[in-house]
Amino acid sequence: METLEALRLRRSIRNYMDVPVEFEKVGNILDAARLAPSAGNVQDWKFILVTKEETRKKIAEACLKQYWMQDAPVHIVVVCHPKKVAAFYGEKGEKVYCRHNSAAAVENMLVAAIDQGLGSCWVGAFEEDMLRTALKIPANASPEAVVTVGYAAEKPQMPQKFKIENIAFFESYGNRIKDIAAFMDYYGEHVQSAIKKGKEMFKKVLEKKKQ
């Protein structure tokens, strides 16, 4: 599946088939998370893979009693180490960058899941102490998200999304792109012109070397 197609097809799945997920696919999802960018390449994350029904029920309970979660055959809990990032970036690393890192890893997992024909959901609402107890998460680690994974038993419609012209500005905040199609045409011509100039410069450099 092409990346852009995967992004368009991704949905938050809350209804799963009672079908186990192949371990190879789970491994690919974890590998996708591992490959996510992180501040300074610190890679402060850890991923707890949960498949036992009893533990999945505890996680669902900790996630504000979202009991639909326990039907997903795979849970992946994303944990970060704020102090590890703080060692390089101080308070902002501890409070902001580590969470950016975890979010990037989660998004990679969601895309990897849909790419393999699986459904997934990013769950960020939970009672931290309950989740810590259920998974024995140490005090120096911070649970950031739970990702449920499995074969979807539903096909949610695309939720309403803002159009590009409602969210994108050009060159400065508030400068809206009124006609996105015209802008893309203009930008495409601009890129082609830049490429042409680059080729001409490269050609001139080669000619000078031959002289």
Image (cartoon, rainbow, N blue to C red):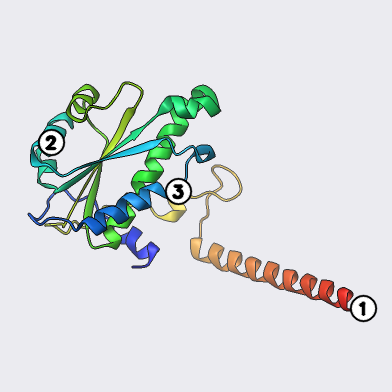
Identified by mark 2, the residue type is Thr
Q: Secondary structure at mark 1?
A: loop
Q: According to the image, label 3 marks what residue?
A: 167
| 3D distance between C-alphas at marks 1 and 3 | 52 Å
Q: Which badge, 1 or 3, is on the more N-terminal residue?
A: 3
At 13% from the left edge and 36% from the top edge, which residue is drawn?
Answer: 55
Labelled disc at residue 55:
2
Q: According to the image, label 1 marks what residue?
A: 211
At 21% from the left edge and 28% from the top edge, which residue is drawn?
Answer: 131
Q: Is residue 164 above or below residue 104?
A: below
Q: Is residue 90 above or below residue 100?
A: above
In percent of width and height, residue 111 lies at 33, 55
Identified by mark 3, the residue type is Ile
| 3D distance between C-alphas at marks 3 and 2 | 40 Å
| 3D distance between C-alphas at marks 2 and 1 | 74 Å
Q: Are marks 3 and 2 in contact (CB under 8 Å)?
A: no
At 61% from the left edge and 48% from the top edge, which residue is drawn?
Answer: 171
* Image quadrant occupied by the C terminus: bottom right
